Image: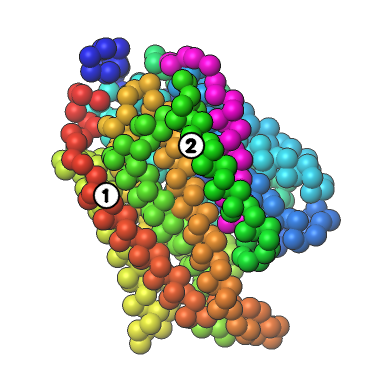
Amino acid sequence: MDEDSGAVAVPERHPRLAVTILCAAGIVVALMQTIIVPLIPQLPTLLDADPGNTAWALTITLLAGSVITPIGGRLGDMYGKRLMLMASMGCVAAGSVVCALSTSLPPFLVGRALQGLGFGTIALGISVMRDIVPPRHLGSSVGTMSASLGIGGALGLPFAAAIAQQVSWHALFWACGAAALAGALGIALTVPESPTRTGGRFDLLGAIGLAAMLVFLLLPLSKGSTWGWASPLTLGMFAAFVVVGVVWWFVERRGSNPLIDLHVATQRPVLLTNIASIATGFAFYSMQLIPIQLLMAPTSGPDGLGLDMLTASLVLAPSGILMFVFSHVSARLTAAFGPRVSLATGGVVIGAGYIVFIVALSGPWTMNWGIMLAVACFIGAGLGVAYSAMPALIMQSVRVEQTGEANGVNALMRVVGTSTSAAVVGMILTWSMLSVPDADGTPVSVPSETGYLWASGISLGACVLAIVLALAIPRRPPITVENV
């Protein structure tokens, strides 16, 4: 390492195979977030459990993933990113096997929690690329790794629906376990160990405090609609989040080797990037919640298209492909104008998708799957640009030995954004529910047009906020130059 510049010498040869393996591992981890969706209505029967309890199959994965992402990034900086990547994929493989063997809810939840422990893979993969990829290829490699989140999310629904319907739900988890094991083996064989390590003593107290803080925030956001937003339990957990957060903040600022360096996290470029990441994550997840409900709503409902889950998910799947394609566009934008412009551009494109949706919904036209496909393509393209710019902004603002920690925190901010979106948009859509007959004449509840408009309008506001924050980030040289 150059002590004056903080730069790390990397090979001039582009490790394409290693980058491909890392991106494939990111897609496998991203799949874990959506493969459960087609099974949710069937889980009470499949696992002989109460429907209210089976909802934890989603919640527990989110909680485990949000806790491990910043912690895994810090451990990667201290003890080696390659080691932590293999451990992450190992957790996904173990969790998938546990789920595949489960016949009751408790072991199934254990398996889903283990799968969540792999969620730090994408942030770790981005961080290790800074150490092994030549600067001239770094932007496109990081962009592709960031896009793996969208690709896995978009392909997860049709992948899961097809296997669960045509084979069995057990086969779905066996396939995930095999893919995760292959990812771990591929990382072991192709990804070199990072040459930068901070060493030091792990901040166990800081990790426990961060875990408690995230549970007190994300759990009521996930379960508030079930518990009641004004219930003592919900309000008490939010209050505990504030108290624990304040204590954790003061302890971490005074620590000699803190889990998260708050002096770096509060620097203007990093802070603004992380807040913009929350807003972008909010806009991203809203478009995961809104279209699928409209596409699957019976035609007797407002703007409902009456598609089955597999067909509806195939309509939305191209968004993941476009996210991959536009991650490379983002790299070119970043090279030419800097990542702050790329992030703002991504916000503009995502916002355009919401504008098309709002105009189509409120205008004189009849909603159809073609319009929904166009909206999904706008969102996918915008996310490809925006999500690729975020790690570029982070990496140009922190030292090499803090890359894993900083990217882990940034990934966590996206989780906070998606969790907030799930709470806010879910509450709006639930509030607007009305009863309509399905194809068999059975009454079903679907969101009203007003609910869709309010949810998409708030998400459009999140896009505007992300754009403003991105443009407020101080100008810096793009990451593709030699001063990385």
Q: Position of residue 438 (x, y in %)?
A: 64, 82
Mark 2 surroundings within 10 Å by alpha-carbon count, few (fewer than 14), some (14 through 19), many (20 or more): some
Q: Quadrant of the N terminus?
A: top left
Look at the image and give the residue range highlighted in magenta: 197-221
Identify the residue at horizontal 48%, vertical 81% (top origin).
449
Mark 2 secondary-structure assignment: helix
Identify the residue at horizontal 57%, vertical 76% (top origin).
431
Pointer 1: what residue?
470
For residue 139, side relative to residue 442 (left or right): left
Examine the rendered structure and indicate whether residue 364 appears above or below residue 250.
below
Q: Position of residue 180 (x, y in %)?
A: 59, 33
Q: Position of residue 92 (x, y in %)?
A: 62, 35
Tell me the amino acid under the disc marked 1.
Ala
Mark 1 surroundings within 10 Å by alpha-carbon count, few (fewer than 14), some (14 through 19), many (20 or more): many
Identify the residue at horizontal 49%, vertical 49% (top origin).
416
The CA span between labels 1 and 2 is: 25 Å
Mark 1 secondary-structure assignment: helix
Q: Quadrant of the C terminus?
A: top left
For residue 132, side relative to residue 417 (left or right): left
Identify the residue at horizontal 79%, vertical 49% (top origin).
105
Number of the label disc, if any, that sits on residue 197: none
Number of the label disc, if any, that sits on residue 249: 2
Tell me the amino acid under the disc marked 2.
Trp
